[in-house]
Image (cartoon, rainbow, N blue to C red):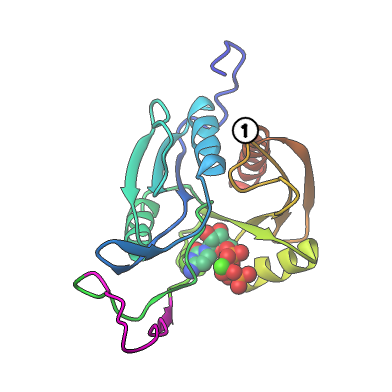
Amino acid sequence: RGAVDEPADLAGRRVVISAGGTREPLDPVRYLGNRSSGKQGYALARTAAARGAAVTLVAANTALPDPAGVTVVPVSTTEELREAVVKAAAEADAVVMAAAVADFRPASRAPQKIKKRDDRGPEPIALVRNPDILAELAAGRRPGQLVVGFAAETEDVLANGRAKLARKGCDVLVVNRVGEGIAFGTEENEAVILEAGGAETPVPHGPKEALADRVWDVVARRWP
Ligand code: CTP
Ligand code: CA
């Protein structure tokens, strides 16, 4: 990337991207988490920066090098991610939620390390729902601001994706099938970009950077 013919078609635009996966602490040493590597979000950040955008990357528990020229905000829990994304979104022309956000968190966080006991079995872990950040961003977006979600589905990919796009109220939802060696932790992805209004753009199996570029193409076309 960075070739002389690189289009700077996102120049003058501010974008916010969340990446990685949130972790919800159970106690000072344990958490509930997920397998998201953050690679798709980082690819979105690199491609947006290469195309001239000012990029804020809210990175949840990733172990990837900071993309050059990108403002990286490290977070861990869903509440931290929410705070950082909502704050950065106030100035943004587009927000892309590529992070895997924990749907639930432990109802309480033990102040000390939880100990096992020989006189009784393990306690169940009580969970509570986390806020839906994407739906909140979509409901609160400024005129001209675009809100993009990602959804990994294991079955009925398109039907689930279309329903989720409508439910979240976002402008664009990128749906991909997980399993079969694609998506989580891999270098490649394959997806369909669903837009409010019904447009559907399939993106063939390929590098996460290629999918990222197709997402920015759609965002650039939809900007007023
Ligand atoms: N998302 C979010 N806040 C949540 C959960 C999800 O912002 N509490 C965002 C994700 O970042 C992603 C999109 O919503 O961009 C879709 O995530 P997904 O887990 O597929 O959606 P859910 O509504 O949680 O649906 P499901 O019950 O299938 O997990
Ligand atoms: Ca979920």
Residue at (38, 27) in percent of width and height: 69
In this orientation, which residue lies closer to the viewer: 213 or 122? 122
Horizontal side, residue 36 vs residue 85: left or right? right
- The quadrant of the rendered image in which ligand 2 is seen is bottom right
Q: In the rendered image, is residue 189 in sight?
A: yes
State whether label 1 is within 8 Å of ligand 1. Answer: no
Q: Position of residue 5 (x, y in %)?
A: 62, 13
Can you say whether 181 is above or below 28 in the image? above
Is 120 covered by the magenta stretch? yes
Kind of residue sitting beneath label 1 = Glu
Is 58 covered by the magenta stretch? no
Residue with the most extreme front position: 118
Residue with the most extreme top position: 4
Can you say whether 88 is above or below 211 in the image? below
Q: In the rendered image, is residue 138 in sight?
A: no
In this orientation, which residue lies closer to the viewer: 193 or 29? 29
Q: Position of residue 73 (x, y in %)?
A: 32, 45
Residue at (41, 43) in percent of width and height: 57
Quadrant of the drawing holding the N terminus: top right
Q: Position of residue 48 (x, y in %)?
A: 52, 34
Q: Residues within 10 Å of mark 1 (few under 14, many from 20)?
A: many
Q: Position of residue 152 (x, y in %)?
A: 65, 58
Q: What is the span of residues highlighted in magenta in the rendered image? A: 113-129
Can you say whether 210 is above or below 2 in the image? below
In this orientation, which residue lies closer to the viewer: 58 or 146? 58
Can you say whether 217 is above or below 25 in the image? above
Q: Which residue is mark 1?
A: 209
Label the magenta part by its dominant secondary structure: loop
How many numbered discs, if any? 1
